[in-house]
């Protein structure tokens, strides 16, 4: 069969400069080509062509099936527009249409309502579902509208097709790589459990030697040195985490790979010993879900409390690893006291930033919390995407609203600076010396974090004193607008942002100015 897989872009309301290669469709491409099929992979951001040109490319490929990869409902308008243009270009030639990805996996009914009725929807992993669809369609057998994919044997899947290698290298990004699927955690607010095929264990890992072989191949074929593990739970079961890290580090050393990589891991799966092994092997960036400093919060969300989480972060930092933590200061049961305690603990350690200040615990489709909120009638499941849950304490709700409004102008420069950091850290690691732009970037981030903390605690004090905060919010917002311009200028001067005007426009848009 001849397949086209497309990752459409999303119509996000906020500035988000982070782009990564579309690993999902690159893996599906490799799986289909291993079956002898022909595949064209397109990405509406990375393929550098407008919809009309992409539609012509799809039609010229003469496909049997065209599949869209959707992470959220925000990509649906782009997918449907591209489909309409492609149908015109196909001039009546019949094609099977399908869609998959996390949006379809976690919101199948919403996806069915938003997407054209003749589109087959594939939930969960795509590889085995496409095998089944190919057999059925070739035999002329019709299938259900919604199909559930089974768990693939990830040890035997072919390495992803690196369709966008030149863009990844040209932009200095990391190559995405998948070492495992699933997560041993079961946090009630997380979408991950809702992405798992029904027959899959909670976590499956590729043998470390197998994934280092893929890194090595990318290094020799493209000169790849920077990698980003997309795994949600890099180390898997705690009992095997040390052995897995050791095998990975040994294999990287055996192949003499000088690489840099980033991971996302459950804090309780890590230890100082594991951190040391991984840092020696090339770990430069770690995202850890800390979420709360209160054991009772963590327990209520199905997370194991961890007493030494901050020590672990210190250990990683001492090894030269940049640590970014996920935090949930604002949640339904939060009080001004709990918000202040955790925010101060984060600020003392230089971990309090734009996301920490703004994040709130929403009901995310695919999560247990979302299902519970739907069954209680607290949210409407026909509305796509995450939905806000009300705060029990009105003062917390008011503080969150103040913070979001006052900090809004700092969002785009902060996002831009944060997204610029991992590539520079990777270069510093690989080249053995910090690129020139790293020092100004760190100083911009430090000054943003200082302003964010100052504003946050000023707003908190005002709410604690029961004062009217409108004047303070307006004053902070105006100060932040000026500061955003200063940071944008410094990012442009360091060669990290292409244009002052474009980023300032993003500030105006995000802050509603
Ligand atoms: C890397 C990553 C990103 C990258 C790249 C995203 C991308 N679209 O490729 C960046 C940083 C850009 C990103 C951004 C966002 N992300 Co993100 N991201 C991830 C992460 C960590 C890994 C994705 C990945 O590469 N997986 C590996 C590949 C192999 O899997 P896959 O893409 O899911 O593809 C498989 C199946 O879904 C299926 N499939 C996929 N496409 C298709 C198409 C067809 C036709 C078929 C048949 C099957 C199929 O088959 C594939 C192979 O089995 C996931 C967590 C996770 N484990 O998935 C979160 C995740 C997907 N992200 C998430 C979110 C919320 C976002 C953002 C909205 C964040 C934000 N607030 O801005 C944006 C949305 C941007 C966008 N439009 O895609 C959520 C999605 C929640 C949901 N819908 O259920 C996840 C699940 C994280 C989470 N636990 O909450 N993300
Ligand atoms: S929040 Fe993290 S640890 Fe918890 S289930 Fe989701 S991915 Fe796993």
Image (cartoon, rainbow, N blue to C red):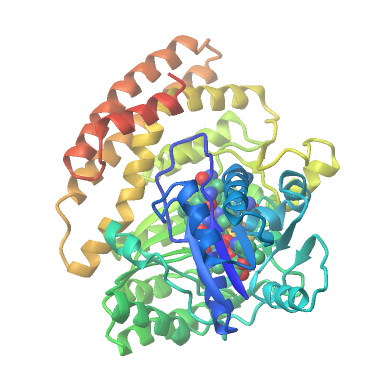
Left or right of 509, for residue 70: right
Quadrant assignment for the C terminus: top left
Image height check: is 202 above or below 293? below
Residue at screen point 84% across, 36% down: 377
Quadrant assignment for the N terminus: bottom right
Image height check: is 252 above or below 12? below
Pick the residue in front: 311 or 364. 364
Residue 35, image x, y percentages: 60, 84
Residue 452, image x, y percentages: 38, 31
Residue 403, image x, y percentages: 49, 26
Q: Quadrant of residue 128?
A: bottom right
Residue at screen point 23% across, 69% down: 430
Residue at screen point 53% across, 60% down: 58
Residue 476, image x, y percentages: 38, 19
Image height check: is 295 above or below 505? below
Left or right of 37, for residue 223: left
Report the image quarter containing ligand 1.
bottom right
Which residue appears farthest toward the bottom when viewing the image? 254
Is residue 268 in view? no
Pick the residue in front: 196 or 6. 6
Q: Quadrant of residue 319?
A: bottom left
Pick the residue in front: 147 or 184. 147
Residue at screen point 56% across, 45% down: 78
């Amino acid at each position: 069969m001849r397949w086209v897989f497309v990752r459409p872009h999303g119509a996000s309301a906020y500035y988000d400069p982070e782009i990564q290669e579309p690993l999902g469709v690159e893996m599906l491409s490799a799986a289909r080509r291993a079956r002898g099929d022909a595949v064209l992979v397109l990405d509406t951001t990375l393929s550098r062509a407008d919809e009309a040109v992409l539609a012509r490319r799809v039609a010229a490929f003469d496909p049997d099936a065209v599949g869209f990869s959707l992470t959220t409902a925000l990509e649906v308008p782009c997918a449907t527009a591209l489909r309409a243009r492609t149908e015109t270009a196909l001039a009546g030639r019949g094609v099977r249409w399908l869609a998959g990805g996390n949006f379809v996996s976690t919101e199948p009914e919403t996806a069915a309502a938003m997407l054209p009725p003749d589109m087959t929807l594939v939930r969960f992993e795509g590889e085995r579902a496409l095998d089944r669809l190919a057999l059925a369609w070739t035999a002329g057998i019709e299938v259900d509208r919604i199909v559930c994919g089974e768990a693939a044997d990830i040890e035997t899947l072919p390495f992803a097709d690196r369709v966008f290698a030149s863009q990844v290298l040209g932009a200095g990004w990391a190559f995405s790589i998948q070492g495992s699927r699933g997560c041993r955690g079961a946090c009630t607010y997380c979408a991950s459990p809702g992405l798992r095929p029904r027959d899959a264990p909670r976590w499956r890992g590729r043998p470390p030697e197998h994934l280092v072989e893929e890194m090595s191949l990318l290094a020799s074929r493209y000169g790849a040195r920077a990698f980003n593990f997309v795994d949600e739970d890099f180390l898997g079961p705690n009992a095997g985490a040390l052995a897995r890290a050791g095998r990975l580090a040994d294999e990287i050393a055996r192949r003499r790979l000088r690489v840099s990589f980033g991971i996302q891991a459950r804090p309780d799966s890590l230890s100082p010993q594991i951190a040391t092994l991984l840092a020696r092997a090339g770990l430069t960036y770690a995202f850890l879900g800390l979420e709360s400093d209160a054991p009772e919060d963590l327990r209520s969300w199905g997370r194991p409390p961890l007493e030494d989480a901050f020590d672990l972060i210190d250990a990683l930092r001492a090894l030269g690893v940049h640590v970014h933590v996920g935090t949930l200061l604002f949640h339904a049961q939060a009080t001004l006291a709990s918000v202040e305690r955790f925010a101060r603990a984060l600020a003392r350690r230089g971990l309090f930033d734009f996301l920490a200040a703004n994040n709130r615990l929403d009901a995310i489709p695919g999560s247990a919390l979302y299902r519970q909120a739907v069954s209680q009638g607290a949210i409407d499941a026909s509305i796509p995407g995450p939905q806000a849950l009300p705060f029990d304490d009105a003062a917390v709700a008011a503080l969150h609203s103040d913070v979001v409004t006052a900090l809004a102008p700092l969002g785009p420069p902060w996002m831009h600076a944060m997204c610029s950091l991992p590539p520079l850290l990777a270069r510093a690691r690989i080249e053995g010396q910090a690129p020139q732009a790293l020092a100004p970037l760190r100083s911009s981030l430090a000054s943003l974090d200082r302003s964010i903390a100052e504003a946050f605690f000023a707003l908190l004090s005002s709410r604690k004193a029961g004062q009217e905060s409108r004047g303070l919010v307006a004053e902070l917002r105006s100060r932040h607008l000026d500061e955003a311009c200063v940071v944008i200028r410094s990012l442009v001067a360091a060669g990290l942002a292409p244009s002052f005007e474009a980023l300032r426009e993003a500030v105006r848009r995000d802050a509603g100015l």
